[in-house]
């Protein structure tokens, strides 16, 4: 694969080929840190480049810059903050192909999906620009005469954004663009498995920030160690920590933030289910299942991992799925015909092997795949296993293209099985029955943060709030009113009259303090 040549050209076109980065202060200056770690190309198993490892002093410099700039940025009118984000979106449009190619090289996701990730950044920026003109409060009815009671929202402060490898740029953009128009600054700690994508995005942000007097609104810290996450989670100067990653790590981050009464926005594991009832249109369901289970090599938090099929349709769907899986092209993520790229690293491939072995040992029937592929890179086969929902391996999230198939008899049974998982991110039902669709979406239906009818679990639009319940963490990002997470709410009352009535009809008459009238 000619990835090395493409890498050199890409880094040059993105302006990062001569950087020796460990931290960015957001004003165009970079700190070099110490040591170094490699960004690995998962398609060939070789380093793409080395980056430096931030020191505690580097993190302190980035955080100090974020705190200092926040004091100014919060006073900038929100529509002007929106102009900065608008120009940032335009810069991403100009570099969409280069950024998409770099993301594909560094994460192994196919080029079409990587380009889609950059488009997602553009989309959320456009959403944030509109939001900058309508950050709204509420005027409430006061029980006291000549009083105005209302709510307003103020910038919160420096926000720490900790992102995972599978969406190395878009998840940052979900947080950063909204936080910026809300008047916050952002300290970014990206995954050590995708540092180059973060450096490229930060470099573009620095260039746009310089034109808007917004240097320091976005800062960056690179490391393959855990201490920066712990420091950010425990630092009282950071009122909000947005963490995307496993439930295991989220469970450690949340108490650190809560101990100092900070806020957490958690986007953790998903173990997403898709239900196919007896009335489902399989021509509609099949491509949704394929993309949901195979997209990003099964390394999305919204990946379809459990498939519940009505027993009357099970044999037909298994036949169609196994034939479709046999035609999935595995290979170079930069090749247009490829549908399945590599896993992110050898650790992920070992987790795949262990999950397949555990499912088979429990009695699972291997319907397709189950093997790793020889040669360089971290490739595996897309895998179908007939399983039981109660098995521990099925109840866990394995970041790999493994889909567990299970039959059901009634929709209530399928919903119960779906909800039995400890995670609660995305869910889907394929049906032609209106009553069943409404049953699935009712209060006693899906317990997930995302519930879809006649579309899959993966591929959310930015207009809706994204996130899930239970061990997924309860956080919400992107659209709807997710912006409120980045602001502090204030209830205010103005008395424009000449008396002081109390709420709840309380009559409290203190001694008169007026001076006596002269006789």
Image (tube, helix red, strand yellow):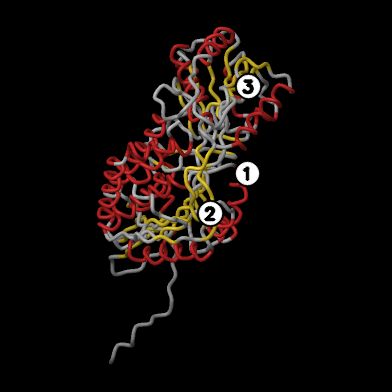
Front in this rendered view, residue 516 or 270: 270
Which SS class for mark 3? loop
On residue 248, which mark appears?
1
131 with respect to 425 (left or right): left
The quarter of the rendered structure image containing the C terminus is bottom left
Categorize mark 2 by other alpha carbons within 10 Å: few (<14), some (14-19), many (20+). Answer: some
Q: CA distance from mark 2 to mark 3?
A: 35 Å
Classify 10 Å Cα crowding around label 1: few (below 14), some (14-19), many (20 and above): few
Asked if the residue at tag 1 contacts the one at tag 3, i.e. Cβ–Cβ closer than 8 Å, the answer is no
Please provide percent x and percent y for residue 234: 56, 60
Residue 281 position within the rendered picture, expressed as x and y whole percent measured from the top left: 46, 11
Residue beneath disc 3 = 370
Task: Report crowding for label 3: few under 14, some 14 to 19, many 20 or more residues within 10 A (C-alpha).
Answer: many
**Total number of numbered labels?**
3
Q: Which residue is mark 2?
A: 36
- Residues 445 and 384: in front is 384
Which of discs 3 and 1 lies nearer the camera? The answer is 3
Q: CA distance from mark 1 to mark 2?
A: 26 Å
Quarter holding residue 478 = top left
Q: Secondary structure at mark 2?
A: strand
Image quadrant occupied by the N terminus: top left
């Amino acid at each position: 694969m000619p990835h090395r040549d493409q890498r050199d050209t890409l880094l040059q076109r993105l302006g990062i080929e001569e950087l020796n980065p460990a931290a960015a202060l957001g004003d165009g200056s970079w700190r070099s840190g110490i040591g170094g770690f490699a960004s690995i190309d998962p398609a060939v198993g070789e380093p793409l480049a080395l980056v430096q490892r931030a020191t505690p002093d580097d993190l302190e410099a980035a955080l100090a810059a974020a705190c200092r700039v926040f004091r100014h940025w919060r006073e900038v009118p929100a529509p002007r903050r929106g102009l900065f984000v608008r120009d940032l979106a335009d810069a991403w449009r100009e570099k969409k192909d280069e950024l998409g190619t770099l993301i594909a090289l560094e994460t192994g996701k196919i080029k079409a999906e990587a380009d889609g990730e950059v488009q997602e950044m553009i989309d959320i920026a456009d959403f944030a620009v509109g939001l900058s003109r309508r950050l709204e409060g509420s005027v409430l009815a006061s029980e006291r005469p000549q009083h105005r009671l209302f709510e307003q929202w103020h910038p919160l402060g420096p926000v720490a954004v900790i992102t995972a490898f599978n969406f190395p740029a878009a998840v940052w953009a979900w947080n950063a663009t909204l936080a910026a128009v809300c008047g916050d600054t952002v300290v970014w700690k990206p995954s050590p498995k995708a540092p180059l994508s973060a450096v490229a995005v930060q470099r573009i942000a620095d260039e746009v920030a310089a034109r808007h007097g917004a240097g320091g609104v976005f800062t960056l810290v690179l490391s393959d160690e855990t201490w920066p996450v712990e420091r950010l989670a425990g630092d009282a100067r950071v009122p909000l920590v947005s963490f995307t990653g496993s439930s295991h790590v989220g469970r450690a981050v949340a108490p650190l933030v809560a101990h100092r009464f900070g806020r957490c926005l958690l986007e953790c594991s998903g173990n997403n289910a898709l239900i196919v009832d007896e009335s489902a249109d399989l021509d509609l369901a099949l491509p949704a299942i394929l993309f949901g289970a195979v997209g990003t090599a099964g390394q999305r938090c919204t990946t379809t991992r459990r498939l519940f099929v009505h027993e009357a349709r099970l044999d037909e769907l298994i036949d169609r799925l196994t034939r479709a899986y046999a035609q999935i092209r595995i290979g170079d993520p930069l090749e247009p015909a490829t549908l399945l790229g590599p896993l992110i690293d050898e650790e992920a491939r070992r987790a795949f092997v262990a999950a397949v072995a555990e499912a088979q040992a429990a009695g699972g029937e291997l319907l397709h795949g189950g093997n790793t592929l020889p040669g360089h890179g971290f490739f595996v086969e897309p895998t179908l296993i007939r399983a039981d929902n109660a098995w521990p391996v099925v109840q866990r999230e394995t970041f790999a293209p493994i889909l567990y198939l299970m039959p059901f008899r009634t929709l209530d049974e399928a919903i119960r099985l779906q909800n039995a998982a400890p995670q609660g991110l995305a869910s889907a039902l394929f049906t032609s029955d209106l009553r069943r669709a409404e049953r699935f979406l009712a209060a006693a239906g899906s317990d997930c943060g995302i519930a879809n009818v006649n579309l899959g679990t993966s591929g959310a639009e930015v207009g809706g709030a994204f996130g899930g319940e239970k061990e997924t963490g309860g956080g919400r990002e992107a659209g709807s009113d997710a912006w409120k997470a980045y602001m502090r709410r204030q209830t205010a009352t103005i008395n424009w009259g000449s008396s002081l009535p109390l709420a709840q009809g309380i009559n409290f008459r203190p001694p008169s303090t007026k001076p006596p009238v002269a006789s």
